[in-house]
């Protein structure tokens, strides 16, 4: 009886080993890059990684494409990182590195590809840029228009505009920026202007400027507007200010007095008050 039990154990062990050897799984991504990356030209210290890691049985191998063409390892500084699956990196990117990239993972049981990744230069302030200064009494409203050069890429679709508090680099102080979310006192209207229902002394920060950025998803381009310095006069605060309409959605040039949009279309109707 003991001999029979031993034989069953041996047969079971052999069967399990054979099943493990025959198992195959197609690749599946566990780490993927973002859909968009931006870089600054002529920055030799800048390195951008495009992460890509998949699992499968047998172990997947990786390929990268740029604008639909296979990339050769070692071309233009691209290198696979052996400890990071299919992750690749580029040092000091230039205009020639702009394009659309895609990571592919393959094994004997299949292939999987990530969505196309846009890798483009990020536009910066022009050298002759001027800083606008606004002096506002505490408690008053103020509007900052998103403007400046280069002109924003107004095309189809319209750009997405956001505002941020920006600290320029100076000496040992690094450039910093913080996105400004909308709240009950501060909103970005449909034209991209930043509107304060009323300002407080905290809105005026030393060495900080307000600036807008516009991103066009079709052109894959993001640009900045001219910065604005806000100075709040706190000597005579305005404590009682009647409500006043600052902004409302206006009809289009061909729609008469009404705001017209298509059935099923999402549409935002805005009104912003000061006070």
Image (spheres, rainbow, N blue to C red):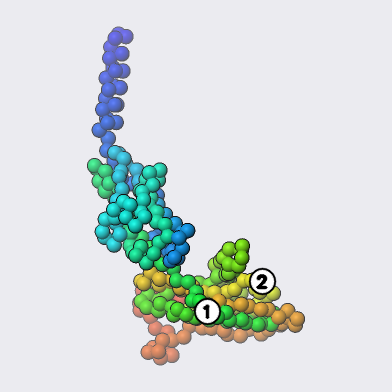
Mark number for residue 129?
1
Nearer mark to the viewer, of 1 and 2 = 1
Total count of labels: 2
Using the rendered view, name the quadrant where residue 144 is placed: bottom right
Say which of 183 and 220 sits in front: 220
- In this rendering, is residue 2 above or below 42? above
Q: Which residue is mark 2?
A: 206
Q: Which x, y percent locates residue 171?
A: 61, 65
* Residue drawn where x is 29% and y is 53% of the image: 72
- In this rendering, is residue 22 above or below 88? above
* Residue drawn where x is 35% and y is 71% of the image: 218
Query: Does residue 246 appear left or right of residue 57 in this picture?
Result: right
Query: Does residue 224 appear left or right of residue 4 in this picture?
Result: right
Residue at the right extreme, as displayed = 235
Look at the image and tell me in which quarter the N terminus lies. Answer: top left
Q: Which x, y percent locates residue 13?
A: 30, 22
Cβ–Cβ under 8 Å for marks 1 and 2: no
Say which of 46 and 163 sits in front: 46
**Mark closest to the chain's N terminus, 1 or 2:** 1
- In this rendering, is residue 13 above or below 229? above
Using the rendered view, name the quadrant where residue 50 is placed: bottom left
Q: Which x, y percent locates residue 228?
A: 58, 78
Badge 1: residue crowd in 10 Å (few <14, some 14–19, many ≥20): few
Q: CA distance from mark 1 to mark 2?
A: 20 Å
Look at the image and tell me in which quarter the C terminus lies. Answer: bottom right
Badge 2: residue crowd in 10 Å (few <14, some 14–19, many ≥20): few
Say which of 199 and 178 sits in front: 178
């Amino acid at each position: 009886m003991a001999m029979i039990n031993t034989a069953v154990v041996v047969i079971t062990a052999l069967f399990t080993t054979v099943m493990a050897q025959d198992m195959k799984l197609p690749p599946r991504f566990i780490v993927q890059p973002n859909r968009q990356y931006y870089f600054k030209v002529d920055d030799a210290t800048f390195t951008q990684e495009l992460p890509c890691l998949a699992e499968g049985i047998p172990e997947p191998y990786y390929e990268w494409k740029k604008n639909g063409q296979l990339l050769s390892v070692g071309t233009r500084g691209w290198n696979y990182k052996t400890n990071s699956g299919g992750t690749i990196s580029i040092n000091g990117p230039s205009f020639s590195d702009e394009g659309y990239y895609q990571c592919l993972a393959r094994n004997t049981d299949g292939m999987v590809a990530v969505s196309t990744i846009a890798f483009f230069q990020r536009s910066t302030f022009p050298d002759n840029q001027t800083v606008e200064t606004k002096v506002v009494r505490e408690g008053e409203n103020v509007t900052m228009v998103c403007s400046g050069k280069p002109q924003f890429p107004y095309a189809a679709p319209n750009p997405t505009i956001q505002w941020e508090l920006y600290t320029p680099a100076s000496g040992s102080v690094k450039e910093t920026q913080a996105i400004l979310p909308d709240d009950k006192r501060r909103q970005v209207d449909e034209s991209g202007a930043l509107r304060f229902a009323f300002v407080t002394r905290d809105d005026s920060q030393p060495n900080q400027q307000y600036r807008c950025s516009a991103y066009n998803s079709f052109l894959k381009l993001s640009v900045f507007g001219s910065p604005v310095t806000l100075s709040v006069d706190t000597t005579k605060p305005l404590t009682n200010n009647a409500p006043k309409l600052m902004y409302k959605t206006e009809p289009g040039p061909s729609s008469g007095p009404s705001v017209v949009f298509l059935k099923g279309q999402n549409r935002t109707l805005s009104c912003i008050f000061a006070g």
